Image (cartoon, rainbow, N blue to C red):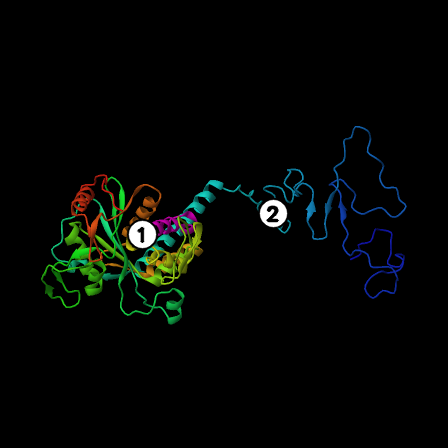
Amino acid sequence: MNDWPEGWSDDNRGPRYGRGSAGAQPESARVMRQVRRGPGAPGPRPAYGDRGPAAPPSGAGVPRQPSYVDGRGHESGAGYDSGYNTGQVYGGPGGRGPGDPPGAPTRSPRPAPNWRRRIKWTAITVATVVVVTSVATYFWADSKLRREVDLSKVIDRPEGGDGTNYLIVGSDSREGMSKEDEKKLHTGGAEGKRTDSMMILHVGGDSDTLISLPRDSDVVVPSYEGSTSGKVYPAQGRHAKLNATYAEDGPTLLVRTIEANTGLRIDHYVEIGFQGFAGIVDAVGGVEIDIDKGFKDKWSGADFKAGKQTLDGQQALAFVRTRHAFAASDLQRTKNQQKFLAALAHQVATPSTVLNPFRFYPTMGAGLDSLIVDKDMGLWDLASMFWAMKGVSGGDGTSMNMPISGSVGGNLVWDKAKVKTLVDELNNGQKVTVTGD
């Protein structure tokens, strides 16, 4: 088929420019757009040099504009819409994409982000993470509690009163300590364990009250059931130091003796040894305390100057154990123990510890690994105890020693009248009016 204009022959086209041609000129486009004329247009194009038909007379109307056919056979004109007539061009909202074929459906505009929905799901996600973490932490912590004391073995117990009474015991247990640890902490290597400190924390009523029980307190040993033998030992009226009852038959006899000599029911038991105590102090980054008067003690390793200072675990243990540096050795030591434990509870409960996982979990781990509690003790009870001690340290409660009336054979004798008044006030939820040295 000859596509060249009429009047042109194959010979007068000039040099050929195509594949395999010898011409030096580049090959021109193989498919050219052609003008398709309206229905009245002449078919063949006039020969080169012909003028063609004359212009239409004036007033005959504007001839139809030519349409174009591209190389793929698509006609542009009435049936073709480039998008410019409607404003739907590439990249515009609702237009076609650059890779879409002709006739493809237009794309919907991208919806605006739903910020309310995003905030909602973000809040749900955060809440879920917090709940899951809290539940996991609770079960982890609960599993670490050493529930080794069975208070159900304590016989002839007094009736409970208002509030909850915790017996907090610091023992000289060297469990898990190496010879190097014993030397570093100045604990010695004695076998077994004894009580270096004993306190009753009363939570509830008018205010929380922390009462220290001197280890040298003179008490009457009551009848009791052996913690391991199950045998009942009758009372013989014998007197002993309070800490000796712990050495004789452990926590249950200690609880039985305190209840028999005070009439105050002990609801929960908490005990911590030397290494556990030092570990908790180190885990919270040390505890700041204000020491009124400097002192030294070669037995405990204490060497302190007066003033505010931050004690690490080793120093803290020396501070609460020292008694040889004081004239009223045991009474001053109980005051130091109260002061430090209140400061420790305050430090544990601060946001810098509770909200910092790198400090909170080591503190929890160190404390829970070393605490020995009764079988009915729960995490909520333990938390209540620590918050109460924090309150006492902040002035929201009362801190005192058990009232003393004198001494017998080196043992401190409790003032029975004051002790009775104190117990009555605690059991009835009244404000404590009794004072102790």
- Return the x and y of residue 288 as percentages of the image width and height: 42, 50
Frontmost of labels 1 and 2 is 1
The image shows residue 291, relative to residue 170, as above or below, that is above
Q: Is 162 on the left-hand or right-hand side of 345?
A: left
Q: Is residue 409 visible?
A: yes
Q: Nearer the viewer, residue 334 or 360?
A: 334
Q: Horizontal placement of 173 versus 1: left or right?
A: left
Numbered circles on residues, count: 2
Q: Residues within 10 Å of mark 2 (few under 14, many from 20)?
A: few
Quadrant position of the N terminus in the picture:
bottom right
Earlier-in-chain disc, 1 versus 2: 2
At which x and y percent is residue 252? 19, 60
Q: Which structural element holds mark 2?
A: loop
Q: Give the SS element for disc 1.
A: helix
Q: Which residue type does callout 2 highlight? A: Gly
Distance, label 1 to label 2, CA atoms, is 96 Å
Foreground residue among 252 and 54: 252
Q: Which residue is mark 1?
A: 332
- As shown in the figure, which amino acid type bears the numbered disc 1? Gln
Q: What is the span of residues highlighted in magenta in the rendered image? A: 333-355
Residue 280 is situated, as x and y percent measured from the top left of the image, at 38, 58
Residue 150 in sight in this render:
no
Give the dominant element type of the magenta stretch: helix, strand or loop.
Answer: helix
Residue at 16% x, 53% y: name it: 259
Given the current orientation, which residue lies at the most extreme bottom position?
A: 179
Label 2 belongs to which residue?
103
Residue lying farthest to the top in this orientation = 59
Q: Residues within 10 Å of mark 1 (few under 14, many from 20)?
A: some
Tell me residue 134's x, y (percent): 36, 52
